[in-house]
């Protein structure tokens, strides 16, 4: 048997083994995501979703309370958040509307909880 065939066969075996290890790592990551996903169920305080890191990165404020205090709108319930002026949003954040900011915060919150 030519030596190149033996080397090629050995390479194929090693490659197959590497693929199995890659699959196991992938399966383990999916398992961690599945386990962490249980933390997403239920209600979450807005200050948890709008973390300090998120606020520092995306706004001129350290936290959600300070951001809301400066918006010029009395926030008494969730519906009031939609009335935050778009001009205020553009000047003080990376977003054009409260809805855009909320969607980004939720996406980051979920990714962080799942370890992505």
Image: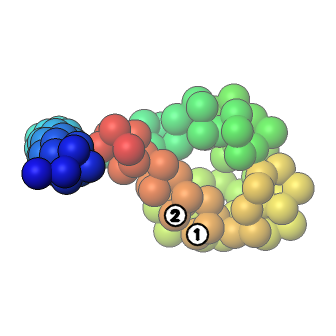
Residue 70, image quadrant: top right
Please say if the residues under marks 1 and 2 sit with CB atoms less than 8 Å apart: yes
Relative to the observer, which residue lies in front, 91 or 12? 12
Residue under pointer 1: 99
Q: CA distance from mark 1 to mark 2?
A: 6 Å
Q: Residues within 10 Å of mark 1 (few under 14, many from 20)?
A: few
Q: Label 1: state its secondary structure.
A: helix
In the picture as drawn, the residue positioned furthest to the front comes out as 1
Q: Quadrant of the C terminus?
A: top left
Residue 106, image quadrant: bottom left
Residue pictured at 71% horizontal, 46% vertical: 58
Query: x%, y% of residue 100?
Result: 61, 67
Q: Is residue 86 visible?
A: yes
Q: Label 2: state its secondary structure.
A: helix
Lateral position of residue 92 relative to residue 63, left or right: right
Q: How is the image coloured?
A: rainbow
Lateral position of residue 24 relative to residue 83, left or right: left
Q: Is residue 104 above or below residue 52?
A: below
Residue pictured at 47% horizontal, 61% vertical: 78
Residue pictured at 52% horizontal, 52% vertical: 105
Relative to the observer, which residue lies in front, 101 or 87? 101
Q: Is residue 67 above or below residue 41?
A: above
Relative to the observer, which residue lies in front, 76 or 15? 15
Which circle, 1 or 2, is nearer the viewer?
2
Disc number at residue 103? 2
Query: x%, y% of residue 16?
Result: 15, 50
Query: x%, y% of residue 102?
Result: 54, 60
Q: Residues within 10 Å of mark 2 (few under 14, many from 20)?
A: few
Disc number at residue 112? none
Q: Is residue 12 visible?
A: no
């Amino acid at each position: 048997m030519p030596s190149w065939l033996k080397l090629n066969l050995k390479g194929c075996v090693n490659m197959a083994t590497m693929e199995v290890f890659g699959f196991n790592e992938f399966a383990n990551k999916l398992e961690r995501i599945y386990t962490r996903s249980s933390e997403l169920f239920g209600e979450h305080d807005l200050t948890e979703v709008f973390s300090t890191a998120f606020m520092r990165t995306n706004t001129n404020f350290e936290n959600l309370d300070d951001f809301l205090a400066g918006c010029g709108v009395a926030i008494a319930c969730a519906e009031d958040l939609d009335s935050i002026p778009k001009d205020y949003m553009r000047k003080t954040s990376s977003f054009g509307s409260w809805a855009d900011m909320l969607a980004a915060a939720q996406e980051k919150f979920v990714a962080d909880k799942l370890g992505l």
